Amino acid sequence: MLPGTAAVAAQRGNRAPLRVAVVGAGAFGGWTALHLRRAGALVTLLDAWGPGNSRASSGGETRVIRTIYGPTRKYVEMAARALALWREWDQPAGEQFYRRTGVLWMTSADDSYVRQSLPFLRELGLEFEQIDPSAAARRWPQISFDGIASVCFEHEGGYLAARHACDAVARELVRIGGTYRQTAVVSIRANRGRPDVRLSDGSRLDADRFVFACGPWLGRLFPDVIGARVRATRQEVFYFGAPAGDDRFVESHLPVWVDIGERFVYGIPGNLYRGFKIADDTRGPEFDPTDGDRNPSADLERAMRAFVIRRFPGLRDAPLLGAEVCQYENSPDGHFIIDRHPAMPDVWIAGGGSGHGFKMGPALGEILARQVREDASPDPFFALARLAANTL
């Protein structure tokens, strides 16, 4: 019997271990599956195209991890827990998925988003510095701080290897006795309160409980409960090349950074040597995650190049090395969705990452796995009921 299985069996009155099917092998689904398996459940993880694939919201090379979250203490606490779990994950994994570079926050006017989080960081023992812009310019001379009114540096932030982590989580699940299947859900309907789930290979998915962490595809699977409440938007990422031999723009000399001005722009230096990553966090137009055109736009490339020239003058002549088109899967209020299906209580729905979910995967998976195992009530903060006023 695997570790944890006896405890689960005892909780279930010595019956067989709980069988859970998790649909979606991204950050939410993969980590939920792994936590469930570690607790002794019999877990099957499914994905239509594979963990961290290029259509997935969890795909791509890297993601920022940060703990500054404006006035929302719940997310600061969740991010702090996620940081601890990412560190734990790196120790036995033999690979470094969490890169601690710090996150440099630069604001041109209203710094309330940063400032409102600082009391929470202080209470949680997360180290940060508020730095005068002139001092910041001496510390990071490769950045032009023109127009920057306030600077804050959170020490424990950084970035994560995204698609590689999704793959590693799925591999670890299989190593400890879980099952991975590459297949798609084609239909789900309620049959006397129980889910009847049909797969693309013609089989029926059988389990005691189900978790659907399907990102931008949730609305298609659950048109009655989710529908258009989770909307995919087109987001573009660009990679510029530093001059040969110039190490000012790699993580040993420059942290992950965020620039809050007219727009919310962020970047990851070095980016595992792929290039100087930059992206605009502003929500783009609606996007089809299955068949949408993933060629980058010339207009946004020009806008990002203009920003780089202004904020990082040493990259004025930097060539574009590559670009990616991904998507955010946005809830109406930007908060995650973690709840049961109202007509099928054995079905849990997890989504609405809204562009900030990847980093939270280990912590969210821990929470959701516990709720699934214990048949617990969802947290009202993430519940579907809050979205009742939003039209489908």
Image: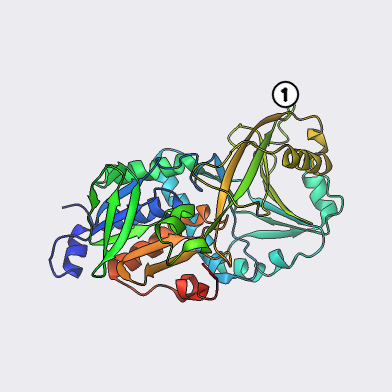
Name the residue: 12% across, 66% down: 14
Instruction: From the viewer's side, name the closer residue of 308 and 95.
Output: 308
Number of other residues with Cα within 10 Å of mark 1, as a class: few under 14, some 14 to 19, many 20 or more: few
Residue 135 drawn above or below residue 316 = below
**Residue 183 placed where, x, y %?**
32, 43
Residue 181 falls left or right of residue 111: left
Query: Residue placed farthest to the top in the image?
Result: 244
Q: Quadrant of residue 168?
A: top left
Instruction: From the viewer's side, name the closer residue of 295 and 98.
Output: 295
Name the residue: 43% across, 49% down: 26
Scheme of colours in the image:
rainbow
Residue 85 appears in the picture as rendered: no
- All told, the count of numbered labels is 1
Residue 278 drawn above or below residue 366 = above
Query: Residue placed farthest to the left in the image?
Result: 14
Circle 1 residue: 244
Name the residue: 49% across, 53% down: 216
**Residue 259 placed where, x, y %?**
74, 52
- Identity of the amino acid at label 1? Ala
Residue 52 appears in the picture as rendered: yes
Residue 134 drawn above or below residue 377 = above
**Residue 145 placed where, x, y %?**
83, 49
Name the secondary structure under disc 1. Answer: loop
**Residue 337 placed where, x, y %?**
47, 65
